Amino acid sequence: MRRLTVLFVGSLLVVACGGSSDGDATTAPESSPATEPAVTTGATDPEPTDPPATEPADTEPASTQAPATDPPATDPPASDPPATDPPATDLAAFAPIGTGEYDVGVATITITDPARERPLTTDVWFPLAADSQGDPHRYTFVTGDYYESPRAISATPDLISPDGPFPLVVYSHGSGGQRYIASDYTETIASHGYIVVAPDHTGNTAIERVSGVEIDRSRVALDRPLDVIAVIDAMLNPESTETVGFVGSVDPEQVAVTGHSFGGFTTYAVVSGYENELGSSPADDRIDAIIPLAPAVGDGTSEQSLLSDEALSTVDVPQLVMVGTDDVTTPVVPNVTRAFDLTTSDPLYRVELVAGEHQSFTDVCDYLDFFPTLDPPPSEAVIAAIDAVAGEGCSPDDMPIERVKELTNTFAVSFLDSIFAGGEMVTPDDTEIPEDVIFDSKVS
């Protein structure tokens, strides 16, 4: 396996994703990309040598002289240019992908895990058939306040594009979050020809956090991967009455999982399998690729760690892990460094957003911009909840949220396309990686 490393200098009721429920949040130092030198790996360059002489020697030993009968050697005509190596290929400029070719519809359904009798409120984002019409979709909080999508419409599955079947992507929200907390991300993926589905992890959502009735952390950790498995089961089951309108448009051979923070743990756990004192969740071999975002992994030794070295080492599906360099809730060290070192994914890509923070991967900053446009304004409870976490991604010294979206969406979609659609992942092999990104990879 070759390793390519490129370092460049250059983060409701909403996802809280903080505190002990997400793993070792504050015990590790942050990464320091601004002071790290560029790194290359592989064989070292040879020592420099003097250039060869370009003029012939005045004399030549007799043993090397041509026979008298041979024609005398002649220099090439002066007009012929010397042979040169072909010029190095220029790297393509980094080009953000933007919205894909499809308009996006959103439907809210309920998926029930029959084994646990556990209902999961679930949002589904999907590519729309041409000329589909509908009202802008509103992501509504328990208080009745809402965030209105700037591009997706509320729609029913009869409006799904006939171009499918499409790959399935499952999104897992962070601790104290909700299914739609990263709607820009999920909408963008859907617009590029994917069906994206995200359940509320009942017992670990914003509703329970605000009302103070969150369930035991061990229960949450076990429920989460089981929730993802239940969602995949339903989306692939032609006999399900809950997903009947979607199943025919899903490709059962193309499944990915992505998630933020505690959802990043969930992303790993559904591939590795997970167990604790309350039970176990099996490894799901239907999953073909994963994208953990600011994952809560821990250092592997403390009580707050969620995944063992052994569990991480079993994760071998293609992987893209992304994080902000300034994340203090699930810092790069040990959460991302440990996962990068221990998982055996091939390919394995690691993207760090310089000055990105924990909430950079959610819609929190968009909420701050949208709420002042509402009349009447949102409830004080919603505003207080968002203000409490907005510092982790919406501050003046953080990477601007529009830039976060460009980078996150571009790397995520190019990765998914490279696995499912014959596309190319954005890498330093052919693209000029921006200075506000630290890129690392392990590819055989």
Image (tube, helix red, strand yellow):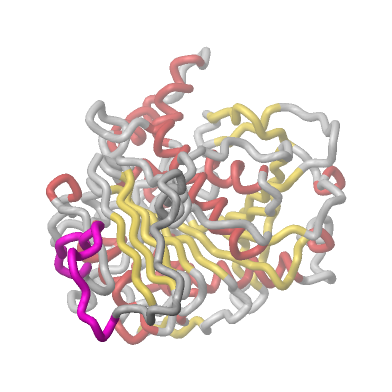
Relative image position of residue 431 (x, y in whole percent): 45, 48
Relative image position of residue 20 (x, y in whole percent): 24, 61
Q: Residue at x 50, y 70 (%)?
A: 318
Q: Quadrant of residue 365?
A: top left
Please determine whether, in this image, residue 58 is positioned above or below residue 80.
below
Which quadrant of the figure contains the N terminus? Answer: bottom left
Q: Residue at x 30, y 41 (%)?
A: 435
Q: Is residue 107 magenta?
A: no
Q: Nearer the viewer, residue 52 or 398?
A: 52
Relative image position of residue 233 (x, y in whole percent): 69, 72
Q: Residue at x 68, y 53 (%)?
A: 194
Q: Is residue 55 magenta?
A: yes
Q: Is residue 73 left or right of residue 337?
A: right
Residue 103 in view:
yes
Q: Nearer the viewer, residue 216 or 437?
A: 437
Please determine whether, in this image, residue 44 is positioned above or below residue 177.
below
Q: Is residue 382 left or right of residue 138?
A: left
Relative image position of residue 355 (x, y in whole percent): 26, 40
Q: Residue at x 28, y 36 (%)?
A: 388
Q: Quadrant of residue 264?
A: bottom left
Which range is magenta?
45-64
Residue 214 in view:
no
Q: Nearer the viewer, residue 340 or 17?
A: 340
Which quadrant of the figure contains the C terminus? Answer: bottom left
Q: Main secondary structure of the magenta part?
A: loop
Please determine whether, in this image, residue 429 is positioned above or below residue 359.
below
Q: Is residue 209 left or right of residue 23?
A: right
